[in-house]
Image (tube, helix red, strand yellow):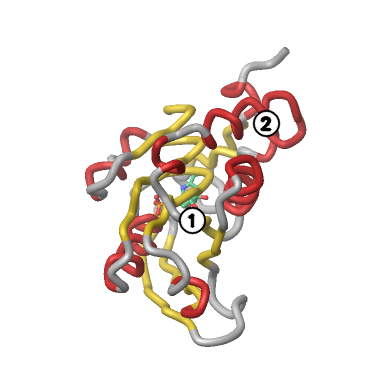
Amino acid sequence: MKKLIELIETYKDFPNKGIEFKDVLGIIQEPKIFKELVTKMSASQIINNADAIISIDARGFIFGSAISFHASKPMIVARKPGKLPGELFKKYYSLEYGENSLSVQKKALQKYNSYAIVDDLLATGGTVNCISNILKSNNKEVTGLLVVVELLKLEGRLKLDFPIESSVIF
Ligand code: AMP
């Protein structure tokens, strides 16, 4: 059986020159490994200590919703522009390859007091920092961040002041 790290393919110069894109989608083609990963992530104190999960558009939804199901925790989503209806909290951020904004539905965010952030990958930390700012400015507690992949040399974790757990480090 393949190992988790072998299911993460690297694409050089995608989506821009100089970026080494780590494609995590191979993981969901190997249900046994996906299940092991989700089971491990679901058992984290970061999840246990949270009222709810907030997962990030779009690959974060894959792992976030599986953890939500496995750990029986509610999940809300942070989405890119133009995707969410209703009243939103919106914040701009920069990422490894560009700038974007993330939005959260006000009604959903208000339901819970503490959140575990879930995404596929931590690079510079700009994306997670954006979510954390939305949460903190609404007086929500951040129990931590769970990601599948961490790109260590981009030093994302230095920007973040809560526990971080990653399963594969490059
Ligand atoms: P950052 O804000 O720089 O930490 O970027 C993290 C977000 O951008 C995650 O949602 C990733 O899906 C995506 N991302 C950034 N860099 C990469 C990369 N090298 N490979 C795959 N996804 C990336």
Report how many numbered discs are placed on residues in the image: 2
Q: Position of residue 38 (x, y in %)?
A: 60, 34
Split into 4 quadrants, where in the image is the N terminus? top right
Q: Residue at x 45, y 69 (%)?
A: 100
- Which residue is most to the bottom? 87
Secondary structure, mark 1, is strand
Count neighbours of disc 1 (C-alpha within 10 A) and say few if under 14, some if 14 to 19, many if 20 or more.
Answer: many
Q: Residue furthest top?
A: 1
| Residue 33 drawn above or below residue 13 | above
Query: Residue 99 or 106: which is nearer the viewer?
Result: 106
Gap between marks 1 and 2 measured at Cα: 21 Å
Say which residue label 1 marks. 52
Task: Relative to 163, say whether 82 is above or below.
Answer: below
- The residue carrying mark 2 is 34
Q: Earlier in the sequence, mark 1 or mark 2?
A: 2
Find residue 95 and report its horizontal and vertical position in percent: 40, 57
Q: Quarter-wise, where is residue 11 in the image?
A: top right
Q: Position of residue 8 (x, y in %)?
A: 60, 30
Q: Is residue 24 left or right of residue 46?
A: right
Which amino acid type is shown beneath numbered disc 1?
Ala
The kind of residue on which mark 2 rests is Phe
